[in-house]
Image: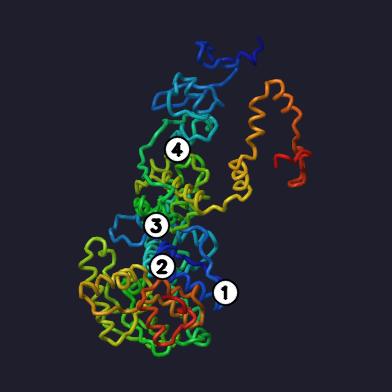
């Protein structure tokens, strides 16, 4: 199986663990993710202003690139890329006036009408690879690892791009189930991580993020799984500050869902990239004798 | 004079000393330089046409060979909404083109020490945070007179792919037209120059034979030969030059060796 793949800038710099684990896992499952040969930043944040069409040009250009190379589907890993590509796609498909304005502006590209389908990797795993296939290929199930299923905003909102119908979201639960971990549902699964407020209002963002971690821990989770590098920044990279300021009492291991997939498939260090996670993430795996090959030698 | 000659010999020849003298029968076309109409001979480049019209380039003209990037022109054509860009020394005039020269465009250049810079994308991102103002409008690519895929190299830099950005921007001549049209106010061409410097110094594989040769030179292997040459008279030098062994033009790669191998 060969599928067009849109990585996103952060996966090439700060979130290599999200991408490396996904690509290696797909290779192990016989799926080839073919990176678009030309792509630009997705725009990161979907502009809500009705007359601010210029900020839809970046995601639309990516979709045009996918169309140009003959793909009717493009898979994304990062939640924010998924959200901004999918929302721009809906505008191009459903809004005749905006579609014409954007197509007229992009006068050197082929006209676009929403021909390409934007698919998040979790949906791709469920619908195209199949959780049963994954379950059958799992070499080292993540037995006994209690993991909070965190979606954040952009996988679930707004309704018209949600990866599952609101109210019944269970993709992360089913995924964790397939890799042998124990899913932990918690009240803040869809709470915003603080997002870019971490730049403008860091104090508020850190408070929100600490609340999410606390909620997950109180629900009995030993770790938390997510699919967004910005959520990862607020929920994982900021934990040191939170502990220092007493906002949380101890660190909560944060994993990209693709890392748990790679670990369960029995892939090694270069695939799982736990070296890019916080120390406590490696420690919990070691303490439970999980993913031994992937964590061996990481201090 | 035949009838045929009468029909086309319509151009008045002016010989002021610093202007081109048109051959008999040459046709002229109207172009608008900064809004003023001039009749210039067709087939000239924009630069020569402007000089024909009386403009004198003190700056904004360099190599006149399409390399230095000093003479970008922005122009429009009659009945066409699109902006066009070209190098004045390379672009041939067309009837009714409206043009202006843009010899310089302000763009901030970050200062850095290439000897101590860490050769990673984050260093570039820190020096040029404007990078993240890009909205992918592609005006930069449209404005490039060299056909460089500017948006693609800017995207590659954001993605941390220094090698790809260096290759994509290789044809850049630093004219600044990308920066002139940028919605995000990026200084693209300065960023690309930093990228190529980092690529050349830290990432591109080094030529082993060059390193060896530099070592030989520094060890003094060729000092005596050089000294001998410096002391030679002109006639002796000429003779040596004419009699030198030379690789035949069509010799297959790697097959030719000189008789005298003492300097290899």
Residue A247 x/y as whole percent: 21, 75
Q: Nearer the viewer, mark 1 or mark 3?
A: 3
Residue displayed at 37% across by 43% down: B109
Which of the labelled discs sits on residue A15, or is there none? 2
Which callout, 2 or 3, points to the residue nearer the camera? 3
Residue B263 against residue B155 in the figure, above or below: above
Q: Residues within 10 Å of mark 3 (few under 14, many from 20)?
A: some
Mark 1 and mark 4: Cα distance apart in space = 45 Å
- Give the alpha-carbon distance from disc 1 to disc 2, as whole Å: 25 Å
Indicate the position of residue A87 as horizontal and vertical percent values: 37, 65
Whether the residues at callouts 3 and 4 have beta carbons within 8 Å, the answer is: no
Q: Is residue A132 visible?
A: no
Where does the image place residue B154, in percent across and percent down from the top left? 43, 52
Spatial CA span between label 2 and label 4: 35 Å
Is label 2 on the same chain as label 4? no
The answer to whether residue B28 is above or below residue B248 is: above
The residue beneath circle 1 is A1
Query: What residue is pinned by disc 4?
Result: B175
Instruction: For marks 1 and 2, give the one nearer the viewer.
Output: 2
Left-right relation of A224 to B43:
left
Element at badge 2? loop
């Amino acid at each position: 199986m060969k599928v067009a793949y849109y990585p996103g800038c952060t996966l090439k710099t700060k979130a290599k663990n999200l991408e490396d684990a996904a690509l290696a896992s797909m290779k192990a499952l016989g799926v080839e993710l073919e990176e678009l040969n030309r792509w630009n930043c997705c725009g990161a944040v979907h502009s809500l202003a009705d007359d601010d069409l210029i900020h839809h040009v970046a995601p639309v250009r990516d979709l045009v690139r996918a169309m140009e190379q003959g793909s009717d589907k493009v898979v994304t890993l990062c939640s924010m890329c998924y959200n901004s590509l999918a929302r721009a796609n809906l505008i191009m498909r459903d809004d005749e006036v905006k579609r014409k304005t954007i197509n007229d502006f992009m006068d050197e590209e082929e006209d676009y009408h929403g021909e390409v389908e934007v698919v998040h990797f979790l949906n791709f795993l469920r619908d195209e690879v199949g959780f049963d296939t994954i379950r059958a290929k799992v070499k080292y199930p993540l037995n006994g690892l209690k993991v909070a299923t965190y979606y954040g905003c952009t996988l679930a909102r707004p309704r018209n791009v949600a990866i599952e119908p609101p109210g019944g979201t269970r993709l992360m639960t089913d995924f964790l189930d397939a890799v042998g971990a124990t899913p932990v549902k918690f009240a803040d699964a869809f709470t915003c991580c603080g997002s870019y407020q971490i730049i403008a209002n860091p104090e508020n963002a850190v408070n929100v993020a600490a609340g999410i971690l606390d909620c997950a821990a109180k629900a009995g989770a030993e770790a938390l799984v997510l699919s967004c590098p910005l959520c990862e920044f607020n929920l994982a990279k900021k934990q040191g500050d939170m502990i220092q300021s007493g906002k949380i009492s101890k660190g909560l291991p944060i994993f990209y869902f693709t890392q748990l997939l790679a670990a369960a498939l029995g892939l090694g260090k270069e695939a799982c990239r736990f070296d890019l996670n916080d120390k406590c993430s490696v420690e919990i795996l070691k303490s439970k004798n999980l993913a031994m090959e992937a964590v061996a030698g990481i201090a | 004079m035949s009838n045929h000659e009468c029909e086309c010999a319509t151009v008045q020849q002016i010989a002021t000393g610093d202007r081109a003298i048109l051959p008999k029968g040459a046709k002229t076309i109207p172009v608008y330089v900064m809004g003023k109409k001039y009749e210039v001979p067709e087939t000239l480049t924009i630069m020569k046409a402007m000089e024909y019209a009386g403009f004198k380039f003190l700056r904004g003209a360099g190599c006149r060979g399409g390399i230095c990037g000093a003479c970008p022109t922005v122009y429009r054509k009659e009945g066409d909404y699109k902006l066009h860009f070209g190098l004045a020394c390379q672009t041939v005039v067309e009837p009714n083109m409206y043009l202006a020269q843009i010899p310089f465009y302000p763009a901030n250049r970050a200062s850095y020490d290439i000897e101590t810079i860490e050769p990673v994308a984050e260093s570039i991102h820190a020096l040029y945070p404007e990078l993240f103002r890009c909205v992918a409008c592609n005006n930069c690519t449209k404005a490039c007179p060299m056909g460089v895929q500017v948006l693609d190299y800017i995207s590659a830099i954001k993605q941390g792919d220094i090698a790809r950005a260096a290759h994509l921007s290789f044809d850049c001549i630093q004219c600044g037209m990308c920066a002139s049209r940028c919605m995000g106010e990026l200084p693209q061409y300065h960023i690309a120059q930093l990228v190529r410097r980092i690529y050349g110094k830290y990432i591109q594989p080094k030529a082993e034979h060059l390193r060896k040769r530099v070592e030989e030179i520094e060890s003094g292997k060729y000092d005596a030969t050089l000294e001998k040459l410096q002391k030679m008279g002109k006639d002796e030098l000429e003779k040596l030059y004419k009699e030198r062994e030379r690789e035949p033009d069509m010799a297959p790669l790697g097959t030719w060796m000189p008789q005298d191998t003492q300097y290899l």
